[in-house]
Amino acid sequence: MSSEANAAMSGAVERIREIVGERGRISEPDRLEPYLVEWRGLYRGATPLLVRPADTSEVAAVVAICAETGIGLVPQGGNTGLCGGAIPSPGGDQIVLSLERMTRVRDIDAANFTMTVDAGCVLADVQRAAADEDRYFPLSLAAEGSCRIGGNISTNAGGINVLRYGVMRHLVLGLEVVLPDGRIWNGLRTLRKNTFGYDLKQLFIGAEGTLGIITGAVLELFPPPRSIATAWLALRDLDACVELLAAARDAAGDMLVAFELMPGTGLEFVLEHIPQTRDPLARPHIWYALLELAGSGTGDSAQQKIEAVLEGAMANGIVVDGVIATSGVQRAELWKLRESMSEAQKKQGASIKHDIAVPVAALPEFMRAATDAVEARLPGIRVVAFGHAGDGNVHFNLSQPPGMDRIAFLERWQEFNRIVHDIVIGFGGSISAEHGVGLLKRHELAHYAHPLELELMRRLKQALDPQGIMNPGKVL
């Protein structure tokens, strides 16, 4: 930074310190470290100050100082993202604003099926608070014990229950946002029907903190599931995935809440690296599906439905083996196999990840085309493709060939991005299904998005954040 920039930063830091107090700031290198590194270690940043406001007014005061001095501000929730969207630049010229102290459940209206929360609430805590009032918040992710609602909203998180409840965008009724000039927009409405002008909250959902900082949200709640049934099924082949999904939706309708696809390779990684896991079936298979049905009524309706689905699928040769969980413990064991795949793959060495979505019917054809293409480019590469097949979202991950140098493999990230993403676009898909753009995919967005789409995005950014201080360099 220039001497003028250094002076401006030093002055701003001192003023911010006074606003947030001792508990609201971190500047020691050892304490800063966890906030400056992306989960996979792909990005590392630097900052002279991490600020931890206690409430929305403190956030607004910090943003106002940054707006006055032109200093970049990087919002951060649980720092569980996979695209570098919450990491500051390595130059140390940006301030990180963590929402981790803003964890208040402001209100739960059980009769209206809504809850209003601070953006720093951990997702699992939101789920528990809803359950305490006999209500259900359906967003569920592998990182739910550490990710925060503000980050979930800012990345339009999806998770495992999208089939029944939709993505985060569908679960938000209102927002409170600190704008880039420090003003507070209070859009904390609990209405489900409102056509009074533009739906402004949608501007900030999925914007990754580039248009403002979400500080509070009104979330939609649902009746809690009274009966849940979970099955781990071995598929005849990849095409059977689409056939099974159609059969399950025909038989169970809205009771089908989750439909996950897993490869045998991914299960092998989990069994090798994750303690207290076991293969639920007698022998290994190439492809698996994890189904979950849930009903809000009483009785064993979900169990009966899933038994009917399994019976029909096996009779038609779609499924070759399977097990239905008979207890909550066994259900948790099945889900652990699915939710541990990213961690297990990490232990196998370097991986190049793709968070893509294609139309569900095209999923098998895409998987074959993309697998053939990457294997032809690098023999020995291991495709680990798993995820939310029910909505067409698959994490098409590539593990390094055994024995290959980790750095050498990761240096080919852009090369494999282009191979996979070209195929995704050819199928009318998306190269960013649920993890956002951040730093990782901003060049891909510039490459694949229509010029008019990019123009509209830039106009919106310029209108709301003309100084470009909100999460600089992310998305666009």
Image (cartoon, helix red, strand yellow):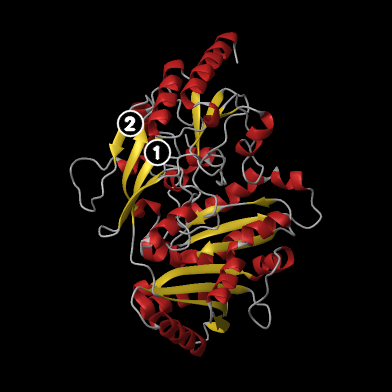
* Of the pair 69 and 89, the residue shown nearer to us: 69
Q: Earlier in the sequence, mark 2 or mark 1?
A: 2
Quadrant of the frame with the N terminus? top right
Which residue lies at the image location 53% right of the left edge and 39% below the top edge? 85
Residue drawn 37% across and 24% down?
A: 181
Query: Residue placed farthest to the left in the image?
Result: 196
Would you call the spot at circle 1 few (<14 residues within 10 Å), some (14-19), or many (20 or more)? many
- Residue at x-position 55% and y-position 27%: 22
Can residue 374 be seen from the camera position used here? Answer: no
Which element type, helix, strand or loop, lies under badge 1? strand
Residue 383 picture quarter? bottom right
Describe residue 300's horizontal placement relative to residue 76 as left or right: left
Image quadrant where residue 387 sits? bottom right
- Residue picked out by circle 2: 184
Q: Residue furthest top?
A: 4
Quick one: 285 or 88, which is closer to the camera?
88
Give the spatial CA distance, label 2 vs label 1.
9 Å
CB-based contact (under 8 Å), mark 2 and mark 1: yes
Outermost bottom residue: 315
Q: Nearer the viewer, residue 133 or 92?
A: 133
Direction right: furthest residue = 403
Q: Is residue 227 visible?
A: yes
Q: Which residue, given by chain and number where applicable, does mark 1 sit on?
A: 215
**What amino acid type is highlighted by mark number 1?**
Thr
Up the image or down, 281 lies above or below 202; here it is below
- Image: 203 above or below 470: below
Q: Amino acid at mark 2?
A: Ile
